[in-house]
Amino acid sequence: MKKLFIIPLTFWSFSLLAQSSEEKQVLQVVERVFEAMRASDSTMLKTCFTADAATYTLFTDQEGKPQIKKGSLERFIDAVGQPKEDVWNEPIWNEKVQIDGPLAAVWVDYAFYLNNQFLHCGVDAFQLVKTEEGWKIFHLADTRRKENCVVPEEVKRRME
């Protein structure tokens, strides 16, 4: 009887380990985006995305109306790679990962700093596809706001 219980438990724990490994792989791609931004490395950044990835920013305008702005992956990659004295630093927290076969979604809170100066906060929502080369981002949407930003104290201390 004990053997019958141990066998399903073993398969279940292997399943959890595999899921955890997949989640780690997905999060590594997301973290590489922010590493590339800090390093101004457009080559590294480009490896994180599919060639036809879409980007969007959602925000509330000065009149309080919700807005959506379609971005350009090429312009984003170019902007990251431009020589600059300032460091783009975007710490993230509250990472949530969901995976179903070749599709993954990642939702993270973030704060954007130029060097150590806070500029805005929001949420980044990534959708990734598992390709032969590994996980790649095919859709990125973010929100941006300057008010109601609850940045964890640990993150604030790192940015000082």
Image: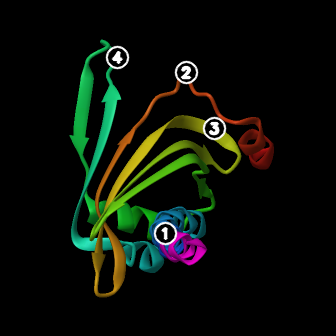
User: In the drawing, what numbered circle is on residue 12?
Assistant: 1
Front residue of 42/55: it is 55
Q: Which callout, 1 or 3, points to the residue nearer the camera?
A: 1
Residue at label 3?
A: 118
The dominant secondary structure in magenta is helix
SS under mark 2 = loop
Q: Amino acid at mark 3?
A: Phe
**Start-end of magenta stretch:** 1-10
At 26% from the left and 73% from the top, the residue drawn is 50
Q: Are marks 4 and 1 in contact (CB under 8 Å)?
A: no
Closer to the camera: disc 4 or disc 1? 1
Q: Secondary structure at mark 1?
A: helix
Near mark 3 (Cα within 10 A), the count class, few <14, some 14-19 or many ≥20, is some
Image spot of residue 111 (x, y percent): 57, 41
Disc 2 marks which residue?
148
First in sequence, mark 4 or 1: give its number.
1
Instruction: Tell me which label, 4 or 3, sits earlier in the chain.
Output: 4
Inspect the image, locate mark 2, and give the three-letter code of the amino acid beneath it.
Asn
Residue at the spot 33% in from the left edge and 86% down from the top edge: 133
